[in-house]
Amino acid sequence: MRDLYDPGHASLSVLTPRERDVMDYVARGKPNKVIAAELGVSQRTIEAHRARIFQKMQVRNAVELAHCLLSQGSVN
């Protein structure tokens, strides 16, 4: 696992606006089904967004994503 405090860690600027929307839900622990319903898309679309978010942010799961966001000061 890459050090999340490493300044070379991916920043939010690599994400599209829709990926940022999905990331907000993921970071708050919302399930894919709920995210899909609230954004008006399919669960498969959310799964694809999550996969790209994790890849771009260089994390393996939602817990690492939340930790990364907290370390960057992106979540209150």
Image: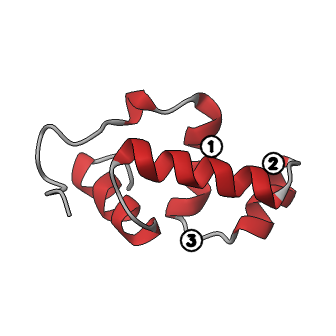
Q: Nearer the viewer, residue 45 or 21?
A: 45
In what quadrant of the picture does the C terminus appear?
bottom left
Task: Tell me the CA gap for discs 2 and 1.
Answer: 9 Å
| Residue 70 x, y percent position in the rendering | 30, 57
In what quadrant of the picture does the N terminus appear?
bottom left
Q: What's the amino acid at mark 3?
A: Gly
Say whether residue 72 is left or right of residue 36: left
Check whether the beta carbons of the residues at disc 3 and disc 1 lie within 8 A of each other: no
Mark on residue 46?
Answer: none
Mark on residue 21?
Answer: 1
Mark on residue 29?
Answer: 3
Q: Is residue 18 above or below residue 39?
A: above
Q: Secondary structure at mark 1?
A: helix
Check whether the beta carbons of the residues at disc 2 and disc 3 lie within 8 A of each other: no
Residue 32, picture quadrant:
bottom right
Which residue lies under the disc numbered 2?
A: 39
| Residue 47 x, y percent position in the rendering | 67, 58
Q: Nearer the viewer, residue 53 or 20?
A: 53
Q: Secondary structure at mark 2?
A: helix
Say whether residue 67 is left or right of residue 1: right
Q: What's the amino acid at mark 2?
A: Leu
Q: Determine the residue positioned at 79% across, 68% down.
A: 33
Task: Tell me the CA gap for discs 2 and 3.
Answer: 15 Å
Q: Secondary structure at mark 3?
A: loop
